[in-house]
Amino acid sequence: MTPVEYLAAALVIGGTFFGLVATVGLLRLPDLYSRLHAASKSDTLGSVLAIAGTATVLGVTTESMKMVFLLLFLFLTSPTAAHAIARAGRAQDVEPVGENAAWDEDEGGETQ
Amino acid sequence: MATDRGRDLLVPVGDSETLRRTVTYAVERAHESADSTDDPVAVHFIFPARWRIYETDRESVASASSLLERAVAWATEDLEELIGEDHPPTVTFESATVGTDEYVFSPGDFAAVVGRYAEANEVDRIVVDPSFRPGGNVPLLRSFEAELAERGFDVLEAPVTRRTSRRLPFTEIGLRELFVVYAASLLFYLALGGWHVTDAYELVTGVATAAVVTLTLARVSMKGELPRLRYVGATVLRMAIYTPILLWEITKANVALAYVVLHPDLPIEPRTVEFDAAVWGDMPVTTLANSITLTPGTLTVDVSRQHFMVHALIPGAEDDLLEGTLERFVRFVFYGRESARIPSPRERRDDEGER
């Protein structure tokens, strides 16, 4: 194996690890919002690392450029989707778990 | 007893997003008809149980009774708002679960169990929540209402609407904006195809595809005025500086989250943090919101203008947020180096507290 292939393998293994962390997080964390943390963070980095690994093997080609586009869009869409779900959860009065996590009574208007 | 007939109300209760306002509507109607006489009017909150869940499913029993409790609590609140706390109540509330001893499935079954309760309690006005789904997710409501009406009840559909707006996010755009969208789509198409700009096939399909994209999506992809080119250039340059920093932050976030998730004790500390960010405009606010979501233990829940509501999962995440590191970087990207040097959200909050 060439050094480039080692790098690619390391990236893909790292990506798989964070994908696994996202799955474990989804199963273990208690409520909608905490689970979104796992889904929006670990999942993004997991896919990003895996894609980066693939792009490394491909070198500078059209294909690897498409991978870069994929990375870009993942970084844009993943947090946006997480935010949309969290916001929908709040609009539907899904209360977060934890003493300090409860919303204030007023509808997100003014601060103190 | 006969005089009471026609004044009491019945509200079938189910988990729905418009239940809260349906309760308000029912209380208002009841209060209206009670106002003329001294006798209080009763509002019955009824949970029609489905599929004899009550025999086996403890969880459903608990959720049904908590839903009914909530409905009564809301109704009491609304009534106090109408008449004030000290006045004798004009409306009384009752709650019950019906249909627990039979298989309730079709709209007719639901109407039958609700109707039997209504007859037994001499109620003939029924307020129906438009989002009420008696059969789970299947939209049975229309025939449920029809079945009730057929049984001779007055069916009032509560005039509530869902909160989501159906307005399409279109903006008015001019030729310049149209051109920018067209150019961007064409360049993107050619780049995806491997940049064969000499290939006639690529060019023709690219021109056609970009035209379709522009005509269909230009009005949603642009918002407001186009910024000046020089400004865009500087922003893109500073964005290039910001990206590695953000990537590093994201990596840290993931290691921190992986530690918490894989730790046997699951040491999380969920809390909600609200603060006003010192950024303005759609792009900067969006960038900050997304950066917050991607970095250590924080998730943007809601943003209105520049007021952020953030869910923090791990200990220390709140401190990071209030230190304002990310906010500074976003300010740097969009407003330049000068404006990066401003007080952090925590300092700003302390200032406000002193005033």
Image (tube, rainbow, N blue to C red):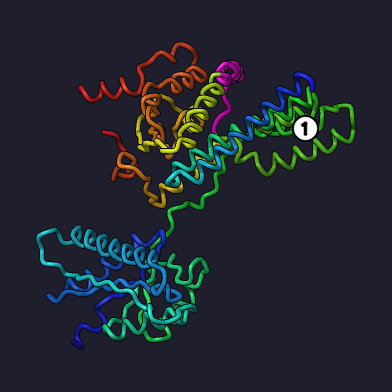
- Looking at the image, residue B230 lies above or below residue A18: above
Q: Is residue B76 left or right of residue B279?
A: left
Q: Main secondary structure of the magenta part?
A: helix
Q: Position of residue B337 (x, y in %)?
A: 48, 12
| Quarter location, residue A5 | top right
Residue stretch rendered in magenta on the structure:
B224-244
Report the residue that reaches farthest toward the front: B264
Please name the residue that numbered disc 1 is placed on. B192
Look at the image and say whether residue B235 sits in the magenta stretch.
Answer: yes
Residue B339 lies, with reference to residue B105, above or below; the image says: above
User: In the orientation shown, which residue stands out farthest toward the bottom?
Assistant: B2
| Quadrant position of the N terminus of chain A in the picture | top right
In this view of the protein, which residue sits in the foreground, B215 or A48?
A48
Is residue B22 in view? Answer: yes
The quarter of the rendered structure image containing the C terminus of chain A is top left
The answer to whether B230 appears left or right of B41 in the picture is right
- Observer-nearest residue: A105 or B130? A105
Question: How far across and down, in percent of the image, does residue B174 sit?
Answer: 62, 34
Horizontal side, residue B273 vs residue B32: left or right: right
Task: Give the residue at x 61% y 37%.
Answer: B221
State the residue in front, B311 or B264.
B264
Q: Position of residue B297 (x, y in %)?
A: 45, 32
- Residue B83, image quadrant: bottom left
Would you identify the image quadrant in which residue B302 lies?
A: top left
Q: Classify mark 1: helix, strand or loop.
A: helix
State the residue in front, A18 or B234. Answer: A18
Identify the residue shown where x is 70% and y is 39%: B214
Q: Is residue B230 visible?
A: no
| Magenta highlight on residue B142 | no
Residue at the (46%, 75%) spot, across then down:
B51
Q: Amino acid at mark 1?
A: Leu
- Chain bearing tag 1 is B
